[in-house]
């Protein structure tokens, strides 16, 4: 499992990445740290990879950006790097997982990072399956949908496609019902990766795919999507 870490407005906190590099190295955490100076939109941030941890530093936009990130993926941890000691975590604990105050101190950073990684581990849900005689583990967030193919199931993810020997009934019983739902006799979709849902079908986020919706599944799916 590789954690995707993003530092927004990285030019405002140049000392953060070296501290992060040191922390992940000392704790043997497999991660990719990306620095972003400017961001067109929060949605753009999620196009390539869903971030596991995001650092914000803009005093004027941080809280609003954090809300948008949590709306897109509640499992993404958000830490605000602030110069204002009057901003407390209690007031924003619905959208922030931690606040670090400037000037950056490694001890305070490590304490906040420890809490954030522990929380991410608890929230992280994984799907394990066998493909080409090897076991694979994929986070729920990277799964787009499953498609029934005769006696097998095709798994579509952000990173590729896999054929699994499994029945739809067994698959659905092994998936977390909070994250997945059947939209058609041949499809199971990740509720977190639905872009739009209408009469034409269910459009999959970050994909050009639109899945059909079976009549018997429509009402239940609409309620869950809303």
Image (cartoon, rainbow, N blue to C red):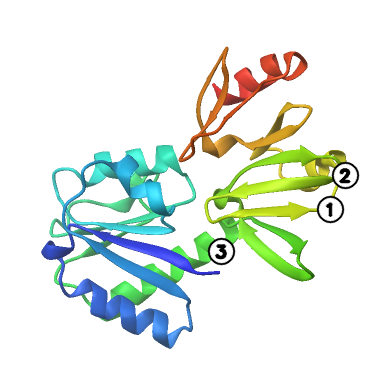
Instruction: Report how far apart the C-alphas of labels 1 and 2 lie in the structure.
Output: 7 Å
Marked residue nearer the N-terminal end (2 or 3): 3
Say which mark, if any, is on residue 121: 3
The residue that appears at 13% across and 60% down in the rendered structure is 83
Is residue 108 positioned above or below 126 on the image? Answer: below
Q: Nearer the viewer, mark 2 or mark 3?
A: 2
Q: Are marks 1 and 2 in contact (CB under 8 Å)?
A: yes
Is residue 140 positioned above or below 199 on the image? Answer: below
Q: Which residue is mark 2?
A: 151
Pick out the residue farthest to the front: 150
**On the rendered structure, is 223 left or right of 114?**
right
Q: Which element type, helix, strand or loop, lies under badge 1? A: loop
Q: Which residue is mark 1?
A: 165
Location of the C terminus (image quadrant): top right
User: How far from the left and from the top, in percent, is residue 34?
Assistant: 30, 65
Q: Quadrant of residue 17?
A: bottom left
């Amino acid at each position: 499992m590789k954690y995707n870490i993003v530092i927004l407005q990285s030019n405002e906190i140049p000392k953060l990445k070296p501290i992060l590099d040191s922390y992940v190295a000392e704790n043997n955490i497999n991660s990719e740290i990306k620095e972003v100076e400017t961001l067109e939109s929060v949605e753009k941030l999620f196009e390539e990879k869903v971030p596991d941890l995001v650092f914000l530093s803009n005093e004027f936009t941080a809280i609003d950006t954090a809300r948008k990130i949590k709306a897109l993926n509640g499992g993404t941890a958000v830490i605000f790097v602030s110069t204002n000691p009057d901003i407390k975590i209690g007031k924003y604990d619905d959208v922030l997982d931690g606040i670090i105050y400037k000037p950056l101190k490694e001890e305070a950073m490590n304490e906040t990072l420890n809490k954030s990684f522990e929380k991410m581990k608890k929230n992280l849900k994984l799907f394990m399956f066998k493909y080409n005689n090897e076991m694979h583990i994929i986070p729920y967030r990277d799964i787009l949908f499953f498609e029934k193919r005769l006696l097998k199931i095709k798994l579509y993810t952000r990173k590729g496609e896999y054929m699994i020997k499994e029945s739809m009934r067994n698959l659905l019983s092994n998936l977390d019902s909070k994250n997945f739902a059947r939209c058609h006799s041949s499809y199971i979709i990740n509720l977190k990766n639905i872009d739009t849902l209408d009469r034409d079908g269910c459009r999959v986020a970050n994909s050009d795919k639109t899945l059909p919706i079976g009549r018997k599944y429509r009402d239940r799916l609409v309620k869950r999507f809303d």
